[in-house]
Image (spheres, grey):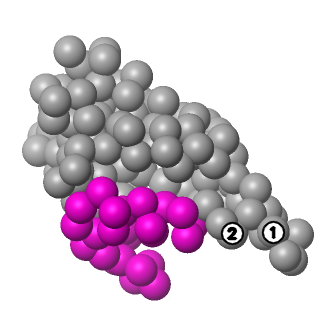
């Protein structure tokens, strides 16, 4: 089941990169919760599919989005921890930047039910209960 969970998380990134909000929504459990890194302007928690989709749509609306350097950090039980770079080019400004992202993602019934983005891999592993 863990391999299937990894594929769902990776598919979520592919769909977000393609700006396919309906596809992203289909991968989310109705009771999904999510938090962003501390200090992020919209930190959450985002509770429920509609709340999280609104936040994702707001982020994707910045402009052109790409996810690269995807690294599977851990996958155990219901949890997947993944690190990646999120590249964005502003729609209006044309300015480009990237963010180093790490996420602890829990799945339930083949859908994402938790997505937490702390600052570090260690914090993500801790959030997933996978730290040493």
Marks 2 and 1, Cα distance to the nearest angstrom? 6 Å
Q: Are marks 2 and 1 in contact (CB under 8 Å)?
A: yes
Q: Could you tell me which residue is drawn at 84 percent across and 76 percent down?
A: 92
Lower sequence index among marks 2 and 1: 2
Say which element carries label 2.
loop
How far across and down, in percent of the image, does residue 70 sit? 54, 35
Q: Could you tell me which residue is drawn at 16 percent across and 30 percent down?
A: 109
How far across and down, in percent of the image, does residue 84 sit? 53, 44
Q: Is residue 41 left or right of residue 6?
A: right
Q: Could you tell me which residue is drawn at 86 percent across and 77 percent down?
A: 93
Report if residue 53 is visible in the image: yes
Is 104 located above or below residue 94 in the figure? above
How far across and down, in percent of the image, does residue 51 sit? 33, 68
Decide whether residue 43 is among the magenta residues.
yes
Q: Is residue 90 left or right of residue 19?
A: right
- The residue wearing badge 2 is 62
Q: Which residues are magenta?
A: 36-59
**Numbered badge on residue 109:** none
Which image quarter is the N terminus in?
Answer: top left
- The residue wearing badge 1 is 91
Q: Pointer 1: residues within 10 angstroms few (<14), some, or many (20+)? A: some
């Amino acid at each position: 089941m863990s391999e299937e969970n990894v594929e769902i998380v990776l598919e979520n990134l592919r769909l977000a990169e393609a700006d396919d909000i309906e596809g992203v929504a289909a991968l989310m459990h109705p009771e999904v919760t999510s938090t962003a890194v501390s200090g992020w302007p919209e930190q959450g928690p985002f509770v429920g599919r509609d709340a999280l989709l609104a936040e994702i749509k707001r982020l994707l609306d910045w402009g052109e989005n790409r996810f690269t350097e995807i690294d599977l950090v851990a996958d155990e039980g219901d949890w997947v921890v993944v690190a990646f770079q999120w590249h964005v080019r502003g729609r209006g400004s044309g300015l480009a930047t990237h963010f180093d992202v790490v996420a602890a993602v829990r799945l339930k019934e083949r859908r994402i039910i938790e997505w937490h983005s702390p600052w570090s891999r260690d914090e993500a592993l801790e959030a997933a209960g996978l730290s040493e």
